[in-house]
Image (tube, grey):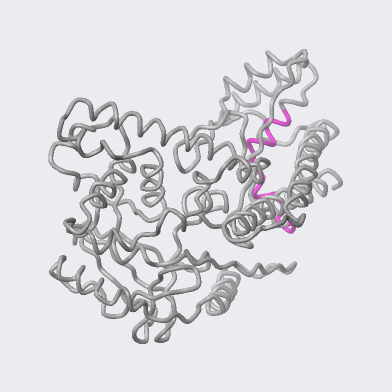
Amino acid sequence: MLIFHRVIFSNTWRPPCSLLSIIRRLRCQFSFSNCVSKCYIDEECNDFLPWLEHKAGVEISSLLSIGKSANGRSLVARHLINPGDCLLKVPYNVQLAPDDLPRGINSLLGDYVGNVAKVALLILYEQNLGKKSEWDPYITRLPRPEDMHNTIFWDDSELEMIQRSSLHKKTIMHKLFVEQEFSTIKEVGKASFQFSEIIQDVTLENFKYACALVTSRAWESSRGVSMIPFADFANHCDLSDTTVLCNEEKQLSEVIVDYSYAPGDQMLIRYGKFSNARLLLDFGFTLPCNVYDQVEVELTIPHEDKLRQLKLELLSKHQIPILKDVNGFSSSENSFVLKEVRFADAQGRGIPQSIRAFARVLCSNSPQEINYLAMEAAENDGRVARRPLKDKSREIQAHQFLLSKITGLIDEYNASIKSLELPTLCMVGKIAMRRQMAQYLLTGELRVLKSAALWLENYCKT
């Protein structure tokens, strides 16, 4: 999928909010126009849109064709496109959703597996039918396994490159999850001869491949997770405000554009406000400079802390929310997500209040201090240590603790990035591409950590 980066502007003067929004919009439009590239028509796909429109019984798009870019298939403007134009409309009846599985199989699977696994199984079923499948023109144009770079396909040595990032752990968890879904499908298949025949040739590797196709291309609708032919050829740009919309009343998915395109321009959408970790896990690419990057930081109360039990009880009573990522995986209750902090932001937005509260509790050195924090939480909104400590020296100590933790992570990230910069013999093709993805991931997360450290350092000084 095609990737672009966002140009980041910084300034010290802060204009009024209305003027600021106008300036941001103009900057966004200017930068976006620099991202739009020219593409040529993919002659191999000239028959695809007519086939899909015949199957749907309606026109899907008169403004777009399937094109070919440096990074694979894309959607390209056939005519002049203006903001507000509806570029495509794909009815639900020509989308692949869980209820398209052969009769009885969907009910047999029930809630044992998720919708992603069901659609993945549907893709493999249609793929196995070959030319006999009514979806063959679509199935044969999906990316091949060797063209996919989601971290679920990375081997141990490749995953070693991103060990510093929380994505490393999430990838392992995601692999285990897919394996569990596969085992469940195989187990359920034993209860039905028809089902067992369908899945007898399905291996873990091709099931993993099909799941990655779904997570990288599907969208949510009232039918659940759905593959949307033609629309899913659109590539990603984080500057774009265009996305795939679901029209439940008309039972279709549509794309209404926010920018102008000249004939031959590649049309770009935004998959979501995703960090590089999310993009690499689910879509198989990263951005050189992703403003949605974030870092997951884990803090723990040392076992040798004499007040450890009191602190744990305080945190448990005034629970800090357990973090869940976009795939539904739960992290420990001491995990916190940092986002990039603008230095001019006095409130330190990007550093969550919960991690600052945890640091205040962690740095308490007497039962009296802990009791005071409990009383303060009970008298207010129930959240513990959300206000600066009255004792300024203790407040500074808590934030210096955070600063030291983040500084340590910065050193570790720098070392990891430096190791990726070392020349490697025969580093070409897939290996070189994944190494660059790892560099973009770690560099983005390092930028977030540095922004937090800079703000904390300034907070402690002032």
Q: Quadrant of residue 427?
A: bottom right
Q: Quadrant of residue 269?
A: bottom left
Q: How far from the left and from the top, in percent, is residue 143?
A: 39, 59
- The stretch in magenta equals 343-360
Is 176 on the left or on the right of 41, as rendered?
right
Query: In the figure, 264 relative to 194: above or below?
Result: below
Q: How far from the left and from the top, in percent, is residue 314?
A: 63, 19
Q: Is residue 209 magenta?
A: no
Q: How far from the left and from the top, in percent, is residue 146?
A: 46, 55
Identified at 65% across, 50% down, the residue is 349
Query: In the figure, 446 relative to 6: above or below?
Result: above
- 306, 406: nearer the viewer: 406
Q: How far from the left and from the top, in percent, is residue 35?
A: 54, 75
Is 419 on the left or on the right of 45, as rendered?
right
Is 291 on the left or on the right of 391, as rendered?
left
Identified at 65% across, 26% down, the residue is 376
Query: In the figure, 264 relative to 284: above or below?
Result: below
